[in-house]
Amino acid sequence: MNDITSPPKFWHRFFRWFCHPDLLPGVEGDLMELYNERLGKSGRSKANRRFIIDVLLLFRPGIIRPMEGSYHLNSYGMFRNYLKVGLRNILKYKAFSLINVFGLAVAMSVCMLVILMLADQRSYDQFHSKKDRIYRILTDSDKFRQAYATSPYSLADVLRAEYPSVETSTRLMPGVGGDVIYKEKLLEMRGYFAQPEFFEVFDFELQKGNKLSALSSPN
C-alpha cells in the first residue's frame, strides 16, 4: 500500500496502538474497506477526514486494549455503575441527600475561605529583602488579654545602643492625619511619624524624594 492510497499514518498507528489485539484484524479490515470506498467516491481529503473521525469514534471502552497484559479491569463499567447507584440514592432520599450535599458544600467553602485568609496573611510585605531578620516588639501585660504592638518610646534607641545583636531599630508613631484636598477632592489622610532608620529596615519605595534624606528632619 503506497502513500497515495493509504490513510493518515499517525491515526492509523494510533488505532493499532489502542485497539484490542483480538479485535484488531477485523476492525482494521472494515476501516480500510470503508476508506478505499470513500477514496474512490469522494477523493483523498474527504476519505482522510472520515478515517480520522472513525478512529476517534472507535476509541471507547470495549475496544481499547487492556492496560496490564491480559488482565482487563472494566473501570468504565464500574464507574458507570457507581454513578447510577449514586443518582438513584439521591433521587430516592432527597432530604438526606440535600443535607449531605449542603453540608459538604458549606464545609468546602469554609475550608477554601480559611486557606485564602491564611494565604493572604502570609503574603503581606514579602517584598522586603530583610524580612527574615525583621522583628516587631510586643508589649505583654497581665492587664491585657493579648499582647499589643506597642512599646516605650525610647526602647528602639536602647536596643540599638545596648544590644550588639540588634543591627538597627526604628519606631513608628501614629499621629499624621486629617483632611486634605487633592485634585479638587477632599480626602482623609492617615500616616505615621518615622525615624531615618525606617528605610534601613524596610524597602518601601517612594513616589518622590530621596530615602536617605526624606526623614532626616521634621516636615
Image (cartoon, grey):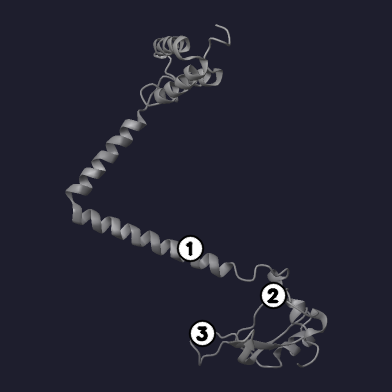
Q: Residue 214 in the image: x percent, y percent?
A: 78, 84
- SS at badge 3: loop
User: Which quarter of the figure is the N terminus placed in?
Assistant: top right
Q: Assess whether mark 2 and mark 3 are in contact (beta carbons under 8 angstroms).
A: no
Which of these two is toward me, 39 or 62?
Answer: 39
Tell me the residue that label 3 is attached to.
146
Query: What is the quadrant of residue 219 in the picture?
Result: bottom right
Measured as percent of width and height from the top left, residue 20 is found at: 42, 18
The numbered mark, 1 or 3, whose residue comes first in the sequence reads 1
Which residue occupies 46% across, 19% down? 51
Residue matched to label 2: 134
Tell me: 165 left or right of 110: right
The residue drawn where x is 19% and y is 53% is: 94
Residue 114, compared with residue 25, is above or below; it is below
Mark 3 nearby-residue class (10 Å; few <14, some 14–19, many ≥20): few
Report the mark closest to the observer, 1 or 3. 1
Please, what is the three-letter code of the amino acid marked with disc 1?
Ile
Q: Which mark lies nearer to you, 2 or 1?
A: 1
**Of helix, strand and loop, which one carries label 1?**
helix
**What residue is drawn where x is 49% and y is 14%?**
43
Q: What number is the disc on residue 115?
A: 1
